[in-house]
């Protein structure tokens, strides 16, 4: 059983980006600038934004964060988005999800300029992804592709089962795994809350990508021997033995599932670091104007 170490892959990618940024600095050029907009006090969102800021420092990017209260009006947030769209010193920005319930997420995401949408959530960028044009891929699916590529996981002709159909992970992941490319060329099944025979479908998967949002949802009786399992889940559970008082687990019951796998990504240390580094890669693409000139 091989551990798909996202932390290791992310570190190597960051080292490569760091060298590229050093050349820019030596040439007197402006370095890439990534901004995060955070509304409210969601702990998971705060952790993610802090991780983004740390990664920016590590590679030499400029990093900024707009932290706004839970009570922020939709109109106020739209003004911030408009300002960042117009700021020529900002290459890319994200509006951290989830947003407070009184704010329409789709309205905010559609207001972001596609050329600065380094999260890859704008309909224009998702459309470009579907037809195979250069684009900013959604960060988590992009990170998973990078992991599969790094570990040379065979995907062509394999049956890939994606658990979850969110616009952030499940749906784009299913499309990317079916595209005519590597990683890709898989036969893809997507499962969701209305799928009646999830266990039977999972047992046919050569590659199982769990993004269902439920802790330990995938159990050992759902995974066939020799499968590759990618765990996208991230959940805090109480653990008195930890100084923090909690530990992180995924959508997969790792301890019981791992022995059956050919390869598996852990939580933490798997997909999480790759999501952040993918955001950095997308920002570098935006800086170089590789998608929108």
Image: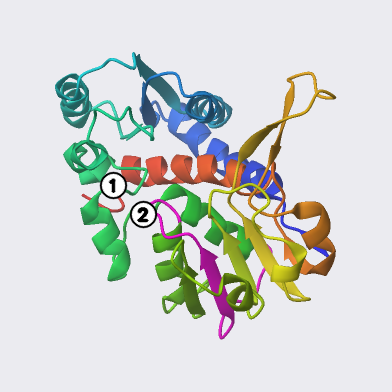
Q: Identify the element where label 2 is drawn.
A: loop
- Residue 241 inside the magenta-drawn segment: no
**Is residue 149 in sight in this rendering?**
no
Upstream in sequence: badge 2 or badge 1: 2
Residue 103 x/y as whole percent: 24, 30
The span picked out in magenta is 151-169
**Is residue 261 in sight in this rendering?**
yes
Residue 65 x/y as whole percent: 39, 20
- Out of 46 and 41, give the one closest to the viewer: 41
Mark 1 surroundings: few (<14), some (14-19) or many (≥20) residues within 10 A = few
Q: Quadrant of residue 209?
A: bottom right
Which colour assignment does the render follow?
rainbow
The residue under label 2 is: 167
- Residue 160 inside the magenta-drawn segment: yes
Residue 264 x/y as whole percent: 72, 60
User: Residue 121 has which mark?
Assistant: none
In the depicted structure, whether residue 215 falls above or below residue 183: above
User: Residue 289 has which mark?
Assistant: 1
> Residue sitting at 41 percent across and 75 percent down?
179
């Amino acid at each position: 059983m091989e551990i798909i170490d996202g932390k290791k892959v992310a570190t190597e990618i960051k080292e490569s980006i760091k060298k590229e940024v050093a050349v820019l600095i030596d040439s007197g050029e402006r370095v890439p600038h990534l901004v995060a907009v955070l509304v409210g006090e969601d702990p998971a969102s705060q952790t993610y934004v802090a991780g983004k800021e740390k990664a920016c420092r590590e590679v030499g990017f400029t990093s900024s964060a707009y932290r706004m209260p839970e009570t922020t009006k939709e109109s106020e947030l739209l003004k911030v988005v408009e300002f960042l769209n117009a700021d020529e010193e900002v290459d890319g920005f994200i509006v951290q999800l989830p947003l407070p319930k009184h704010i329409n997420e789709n309205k905010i995401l559609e207001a972001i300029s596609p050329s600065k949408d380094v999260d890859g959530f704008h309909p224009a960028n998702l459309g470009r992804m579907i037809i195979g044009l250069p684009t900013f891929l959604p960060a988590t699916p992009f990170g998973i592709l990078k992991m599969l590529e790094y570990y040379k996981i065979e995907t062509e002709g394999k049956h890939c089962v994606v658990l979850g159909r969110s616009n952030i992970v499940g749906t784009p992941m299913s499309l990317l795994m079916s595209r005519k490319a590597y990683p890709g060329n898989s036969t893809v099944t997507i499962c969701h809350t209305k799928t009646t025979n999830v266990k039977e479908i999972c047992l046919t998967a050569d590659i199982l990508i769990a993004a269902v949002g439920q802790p330990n949802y995938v159990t050992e009786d759902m995974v066939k021997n020799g499968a590759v399992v990618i765990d996208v889940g991230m959940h805090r559970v109480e653990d008195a033995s930890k100084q923090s008082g909690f530990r992180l687990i995924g959508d997969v019951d790792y301890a019981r599932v791992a022995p059956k796998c050919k390869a598996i990504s852990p939580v933490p240390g798997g997909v999480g670091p790759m999501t952040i580094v993918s955001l950095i890669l997308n920002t570098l693409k935006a800086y170089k104007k590789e998608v929108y000139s």
